[in-house]
Each structure stands twice: as C-alpha cells, then as structure tokens.
Amino acid sequence: MLETGLETAPKAGLLHVEIRDEAILLVMAAANAAQIVAAQLGLRVARASRIDGVDRVAIAPGKWLILGGIDQTALARQLGEGASILDMDSAYVCLSLTGGGWRRVLASGAAIDVERLAPGDAAVTAIAGINVVLWLTDADRLELAVTRSYYRSFLAWLKETAGPDGIDAT
Amino acid sequence: MPRQRRPGTGIDPAQKLDFQFDGLPLQGVAGDTLAAALLANGVRVVGRSFKYHRARGIVTAGPEEPNALVELREGARLEPNTKATTVELFDGLSARSQNRWPSLGLDLMAVNQLASPLLAAGFYYKTFMWPRHFWEKLYEPAIRRAAGLGRASGLPDPDSYEKCYAHADLLVVGAGPAGLIAALLAARSGARVILAEEDFLLGGRLLAEAFLIDDAPAHLWARRVEAELETLPNVRILKRTAVFGAYDDGTFGAIEKVADHLPEPEPGQVRQRYWQIVAARAVLATGGIERGIAFGGNDRPGVMLASAVRTYLHRFGVAAASRIAVFTSSDDGWKTAFDLAAAGIEVPFLADARADVAADLVERGRRLGLRVELGARVEDATGATGLNGAYLRSARGTTWLPIEALAVSGGWNSNLGLSTHLGGKPEWSETAAAFLPGKTPSWMRVAGAAAGAFGLGEAFRGGVEAALAVLGELERRVPAFDMPIASDDPARTTPLWRVEGASGKAFVDLQHDVTVKDVELAHREGFKAVEHLKRYTTLGMATDQGKSMAILGQAIMADLEKVGPAGLGTTRARPPQVPVAIGALAGRHRGRQFRPTRLTASHDWAAAAAAPFMDAGLWKRAQYFARPGETNWRQAVDREVLTVRAHVGVADVSTLGKIAVLGPDAGIFLDKVYVNGFSGLAVGKVRYGLMLREDGFVMDDGTAARLGDTDYLVSTTTANAANVMMHLEYCHQVLWPQLDVRMASVTEQWAQFAVAGPKARALLSGILPSTPLENGDLPHMGCRPIEIGGVRGRLFRLSFSGELAFELAVPARFGAALWRSLVHAAETLGGSAYGSEALGVMRIEKGHVGGAELNGRTTAFDLGLGRLLSRKKDFIGRVMAARPALNDLHRMRLVGLVPLDGRAKLPVGAHLVPEGERPAASVDQGYVTSAAYSPTLGHPIALALLSGGPERLGQTIRVVDPLRDGDALARIVAPVFVDPEGSRVLA
C-alpha cells in the first residue's frame, strides 16, 4: 500500500506508519437514537475507545466508525432499527502512527490542539487540506483514517513533514 | 575604519565572524546584527533612497528600520530588501547595497535629486495621463524598470517552509520587560504560555539600556527569567518569531525564522515556519518605537534615532560614531547623551527643543560637561554621503557645528499594529504624547510601552496587571513572585514634528522619500484625511510601514488642518505587521503538492498508458488513451467514441458523487429535494432527478437508485458532489429534522466503471457469468446487487453515452483489479478504455446537460427538463421556478447547433446573433455552452442556450467568436444528435 522508497531500517526519530487493513463500518443512528446507540457501542463519554481490539470512533452527532474484526450481521442485530450500517472499508486508508514525535508532525498539518490529545479523543479534521478522522486509544499512538482518493497526497505530505529522520512502514 | 569594541549585553566579542559588504571583507562578532557589525566597521552609507537615490545610513536598531535595506546571499537564495538591523550576522554572510548604479559611492541615479521638484507627491498621477496610448508602450514599462529597490533572484526558491499550529492559554507577544514578566507569572501558574519574540534574544530594551533591576544590570534579570521559562514544560518560547497578524477568536499568524541566521538551512531543516497560534488570551507587549523629527537633511547617514544609538552602545558594544550630538524633544533623548558621555564618547551638544526641561536633567547634563541647549533646534544636517555637521538654532542664533552622528528623539510611539488588526482605533494621549491602542477584544490586552507605559517600572507594572487579569479570567492561582525593583525614568515628551525654517529636504518617510513639502502639497490639493494623505504621498506604505516616522506626516497635516493629532487620527494597520515571505505562507504546498489531488482506482493504469489527466476539482481524470500512430488528441478521442458506438468501451466514472440516503423517511426526503418523485420508485430501479435551489434555478442533476425499502443511492455531478452533500445535510438538519433520514457520502467507498456500447452486455456476461443481464432481467434504469470474485458490488443499467450501457461498482480497494479485467475484456471484443474527452463528446452527441449548462443561471424549463417538475408534491424551488419570468419562451433555452458548411467549429463561449446582423451586445441572443467534433456524424456539433431556441428549430443563426476570430453560420436543431429515439439505450 505504501509507496516504495520508504525507509525500512529502524532508526532514532523514525516515524513508524502501520497500515491497518481492517473492516470499517459506518454506523448512523436513527432519529433520537444517538444516545442509545452510543451506549450500545460502549461510548458513553469518550469519543473513541478500543474494546476487544475493535475501535469505535465518533465522527459526527449520531455517526461512528467501527474498525476491526466485528461481525456486521451481529452488530446490525444488536442495533436493530436504531441505526443504519454501511460498509466503508474502502472509503478510508487507516494508519497508526508511532514514534518520531508524531505530535510534532500532526501539529504541522492539523489545526487541532495536538498537545492535549489524549486517549478517548477523536476529531474529524483536515491535515494539509485532506479530510481525515483521527483518534487516540493509546497516548503514544495516533490512529488516522484518510479518505482513500487523497491517500497518495497525504503520504507525500507525511514523508516531507516527517523530516530527515523519515518514516518507515509495515 | 573599525571601531574599538566595548562590552555588550548581547555579544560575544571573542567569537569573530567574517562577512562581506559590497565585496569588502569585514569582521563582526557573535550576537551582532549586520547593522551593528557595519557600524562597528565604520560603514556609514548602506544604501540609496527609493526616489531621490540619496545616500542613506542606519537609522534604527530594529524591524522598524526604513533605510538600511540590503540584498542578502547569492544565487537562488538572494533576498532583496532585507533590513540590516534584523539580520543576525553569521560567518560568511555576504550583503550588498541596492538601488544604486554603478556603486554605492557613485550612484548616477542620484541625478533624480535635481529633478526633485518634478518628483513630488502625485507626480505619476498628473504626468502620465496623456497621450493615453503612451501608457502601455512607454510609461508603464519605464516606471516598472525604475521602480523597486532590490532584485529578486528569479530562480526557484531552494528552501522549504512549513506550517505549524499551536494552542495556548496565553500568548505573549514581545519579550521585553512587560512581556517577560507577564509570561513568567502565567507560566508559574501552570498556564500554557507561548512567548513570541521577533528578536533572536529575549529582553527587548533591557538589553539596550543602562537599566538596573534589583540593583543589577537589567539584562541579567532577563537571562534569569528566560532560564526559568525554559525549564517549564508548559512554556514554548518562540525566538526569531514575528507575530504578524491578529485574527478572530484569539488566532494569530506568526513567522518563525528558523534558519535565516544560518548560511543555509541544515539538511531537512525548514527555512521559516508559519505558525497559526490559537490562544485563549493574549498580551501584546510589543513595545514602543521611537520617532524622529523632520528637519533639513534628517536622512543624512549618521542621523539616527537616539534609542538606537543606545542599543548599539549597550547591546552591541558599538559607538555609532566618535562625535555624537543629541537633538530631542523628550526626556528620553537626554538618556542617550548621559550614556554616551558615561561611555567616554564625545557629545558636541544636547539640543532640546523644549525650553522647560526638568531641572535634574539639566543639572546632570551640566555636571557631565555637556553643552546643553534648551529651546534649540537642529535646522539642517549637512554632508551628502555622511553627516559632517548641523546647523543649530538657539536663542543665540544659528551655528554650524561639526558632528559625525546625530541622535534624534521626538518621543515614542506605541507599537500599535496588532491592536488595530481587529478594528481597534488608536486614540491620542496627551500624557503619553502618542497614539495608544483603542478598544481591543476582551481576550486581548496591551501592556508596557505598547500601552504607553514607556518607563521601565510602569512597564513591569503593566505586565503584571495584564497577567493577573488573565489568570483571574482563566481561574488560575496567582503564583508567588517578587516585583522587580526598577526605576521609573522620566519620559516626558513635548512633540516636535518638524523644524520650521529648514532649507534642506525634511523627510517624514525615509524609505519612500516623502517630505514635509509633499504633505503640504497633499494638504493644498485636498488630500487631508490620513488615509488620503497616505495614498497620495505613499506615506507609510513602504516595507517599514512608516513605523518610526509616518506619525510626523500625519501630525504635520493635523497642524495644517489645525485639528491636532487627536482630531486627524492615525491610520489603522492591517496584517501583516511585518513583511512575510509568500513561501512561508505556502509551506509545503508547492509544486506537485500545491494542493492535494484525488486519484481514482484506475489512475495507475491510466498513468502507465501515458494518459494525460485533467483536473475535475481535486480529482485527476484520464482524458484519453492514445495509441501508437495517433499524433493528436482528436485522433484518440474520435477512435474511442467510434469504438464505443461500434463495439464497447469502459470508462472510470468513480468521480461522480455518491451519497447514501437511508432510513424510513428517505423516500419522502428525496421527494422534497428533487423536482420529481422518488418515494414511489420501485426497489431495483434508478431514476434521473433534478435538484433546484430555493430560487428555482437548477442546482444539480443525477440519478438516484433505490437499493432497498429504506436505502437509496444518490449520484451527483463530480463538481457538485460536496455542495449537494452540504445541501442535503442542511435540508435534513435545518428544514426537516423530524424526518428519520441518515446519510453519508460514499464516493470514496465505491469505484464505478461504465461499460458502454453494443457489446456491453457481451462484455459483462464474461465478467458476471451468473448475473442475468437481458432486458427482462435488468431493464434500462434498473439496478441490482452482484457478487464478483467474492466481492459484493452493484450493477446499474445507466447510459450517459446513449449506447447500451451499464455501470459496475465495487469497493474501491478492488477497483484497480476490476478495471484491468474490464479493459482486457473490452479489448478482446474490439473495444477499449475511453477517457473523459470521449465521454464528453458522447454526452454532447446525446444532448445530456453538463456543467456548462448547469451553470447556476438555467432553469429546468431552459434545459428542456420542465416536464420533470412534479405537480403532485412540494419540493425545493417549486414556487420560485413557477415565476412567469422563468417560464418566458424568450429565455435562453437549450438547442443544438450544426454548422451550415459542415466544417466550421462552433467554439464554446461564441455568441449567437441573428444572421445578417452586425455582432453587438444589443443583438446578442445566446451563446454556445458545449461543443465537440462528432466522429459519429462527421461534423462539429454544439449545445447552446438561445433565446426562444426550441421555437426556432431549422432556422439559421450566426455564431460569432470575436476573441478567436470565429464567425460561422449554424442551423438550429434539437439538442439530441445521436439516436434521438433512444433505441440503442434500450437494446
């Protein structure tokens, strides 16, 4: 998925990018059902959480992305008439960023308060003019969902912004 | 000749730095600015002035410098108009003077001074009016050659820039005494603080004065505070960072000069960083700027601001000259004389325009043996290429006295800039004898000299007050701190704007060569308001923005108007406060990354096929796929069209917008946004739909498919995808929130490919062997789910080309693989891929409206789609679309055109005028919206909007394109050129 030419040997300061090739579902709550659905998804306060390896990310009032190994049929049964579910596994390229001061890199592209991003936070924003969803379930790891058609532009920006230490990928 | 270096608060004399000025090898020390190093080497003339090419020297010691502009570096990194007073010296620096020829010493353009009576304000406006045709060929080129100061390299910028965002509880702008103490208090409270300082050292005037704080040199206090701030994790210190703009809601723009102090950036290092800072509160501690006095020859090299003389003495250890006189109308000027005398530098005289000066100052001056002249004025300074003397007028008459430098103090301006960016109107203060910030937003405070607190003690108090107020608002505890013990130096000023009786040119804007006479001329000619004065004379419009001197011109105008500074007011600044490199604003968005691009699933295949790409918004769409032997684009496009019409073609149509509309009320919702009905659409069917704006004009068109009882898929044009999505969200959230509808853009989820042509069904039967594709199974405007290679997809029976056609959609991650399969399958049937050009040609042949017709000014009636407007239901735009004027038969309405001679091009944009009429706006009846050569028909065709068009079929119209010399006759025809019965689509 990542273009060739990226560093592969780990070195200090390297920004590590992991492609998350996982199922992505979009859950949209029915009218007046947002709170119930949020509770069903395990998101009472936080806007993002990881439960049993599945990320749940609030992206708009009444809308959530669900990432990871989750049974869509079972989820649909659980939510019933309270929500619609769309398969969005191709709409985004999902990345995990670790190491190399990803907060510095993020602060160069996103107008959000990067210093205060903490596990449980999520944002739908733009990085270098590219639509992304970002969230944290771990203080040292940034999760990103980049809209697919922009992915190459995003990667070009990321490589340049990462600086001389570069990035590597798995 | 180099001067002996003294100790300085900001230099390391032991660390020598070699540099060049105009090719002359010189030496400075670490901590120098270029200006300091030039003064230390006895360089007095550093440039020539803009209009009169007069020799100019260093006037200030900061970013307000009007004169000492130099070209820095070489080659692609050459940078003109750099202020020597802000350039941090580095080893190997190379600088050149500018705006002179052939040399700084001998500038032939100085002959302009002889023509100075002609070059007064308004010269260009009055002179270059006639003859009119001279303007383009003579005047403008000549003025452009003569204008400007330095040269740009003309080469691509080799450096990189980046943008950064930062958030804080408090932004403190300026790290002088007020800023430092405000930042310290807030930082100790635990608040997140950003301290931005334009200079490369923190301290401001604490580095430049002989101040004592707590009985120790003031700069040591600054160092201590800096050291403490650096240890605090909640503080970000941004040195070399100029905050250039204040914007809404606590947002500021700033430029950090990351590597400008280095010969060139380190590998991977950006040259400058553009910060967007969002702060809950801001304290502007931007300091003050001393102002000069307008007397004859006040631009001579050696005439400097008195505070700058002190800065060079204390911070840089440089005496600006060996004989420095002082001319002042403020107490502050006396400080310069005292400091110079204490340093053993000869002060030939201290002239104060005021007769009434504090006795202790006079006494101290006399004790130091100074020649103190009260009620005295310097009328004229002399010395063409360097100050050699001054005419001093006192009660005893006028005397010429030899001097090398003159330190001038006309009082202080507060550095207002940022406080005015959000509309704050400066107010004149008689007490401070300066304009002070007016009303600022609640989150912005001004402290220290910027607020008129020009004494050290009151600056500290102002900083503390601002910090305490901020901490109170942020509900933070007040930390322990000791108020620095510092003096409140006398700072009384009686403004003296100009010296009457001067015989030489008296300047009020050194960089733009605006004189007192220019101001008087502006007054005589009626340009009296400060904004008119500014535009007429260019006062304050140069790179220094008149920070030190423009007030003189404004005040002189106020005197002429007899209203005083308060009556006339001053100009309000707009961002940027300091010059900002465009490259820094662009950041990483340059070259191929100028803006992000969106790529379709077939992009790599198309790129490998050497397809040219067109921009459709941010999308890249392949235009055509040329084959060997095809020498121009038309050959490829014609072939692709004929291939589709005869065989089969495949095209990537993924860029069309796709919106999933779900929920029990989805059908009702679509009934309201489309002119036609959708709630009654059967599952498995697709319908063409039209959306109007509230004003009744067409917004967008497309299809909507009903995939399930509560599951619709809306398609939009590529260009309007985002607009339609926003429109639907607005409709749901604002107009009909009671409807249970959920929607999401799924454009990115699906790759979608058109398969068009008589062999389309044959192609798909190979790809989808188990999917029935006959008319009975999947009729025109039908849709169904499919499975292809284990992947769930969708199949639509839709045609944009006018041929039997399908659209096949799969999740985008599988799009590239499907595309390759489709192309291969097409080629085995004699078909091929086709690009956006062929798609567009077939669209015109079939008479489908596109972006050129959906231009925001057309109605459904204009486009021949009026029959779609439902009479059974309400929808957005219904009432307004029914207005009689929008249904007038004479409106410009859609028709087709074919050239009478079968050959003439009918260019897009060409105007339609009646045959036999002379082309003119008065007889203009319409225009061509879309045009193509139709390979199917073998001649050009066009779609056009023509007044009363559908009623004029068969008539002849003249198609005139004056821009491209086009003039042809065309027959008006129905806008469907190919298969008007639609039999191919239904095959």
Image (spheres, grey):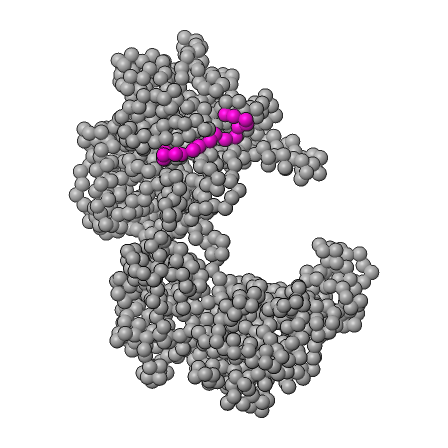
Tell me the residue at 49%/62% (across/down).
Answer: B597
**Pick the front one: B743 or B49:** B49
Reply yes or no: does residue B92 show up in magenta: yes
Q: Is residue B871 visible?
A: no
Q: Quadrant of the N terminus of chain B?
A: top left
Q: Residue furthest right?
A: B916
Which x, y percent locates residue B681?
Answer: 53, 84
Q: Residue at x 28, y 35 (%)?
A: B203
Among the 4 quarters of the image, the one containing residue B949? bottom right
Q: Main secondary structure of the magenta part?
A: loop
Which residue is pictured at 82% across the width and 60% down the height? B916
Which image quadrant for residue B147? top right
Magenta residues (range): B89-104
Q: Is residue B827 left or right of residue B563?
A: right
B853 relative to B124, above or below: below
x, y (%) of residue B438? 38, 40
Residue B83 or B421: which is nearer the viewer? B83
Q: Is residue B183 magenta?
A: no
| Residue B563 image offset from top left, x and y in percent | 47, 29
Single out the residue that lies furthest toward the bottom: B776
Question: Which of these two is toward me, B850 or B77?
Answer: B77
Q: Can residue B101 be spotted in the picture?
A: yes
Question: Where B44 falls versus A30 (above or below)?
Answer: above
Q: Is residue B798 left or right of residue B249?
A: right
**Residue located at (40% from left, 55% from top):** A160
**Rendered-image quadrant of the C terminus of chain B:** bottom right
Count all numbered tags in the image, as a single digit. Answer: 0
Question: Residue B623, percent across and down?
Answer: 59, 66
In the displayed structure, does residue B912 sit left or right of residue A152?
right
Q: Quadrant of residue B320?
A: top left
Q: Is residue B664 above or below residue B464?
A: below
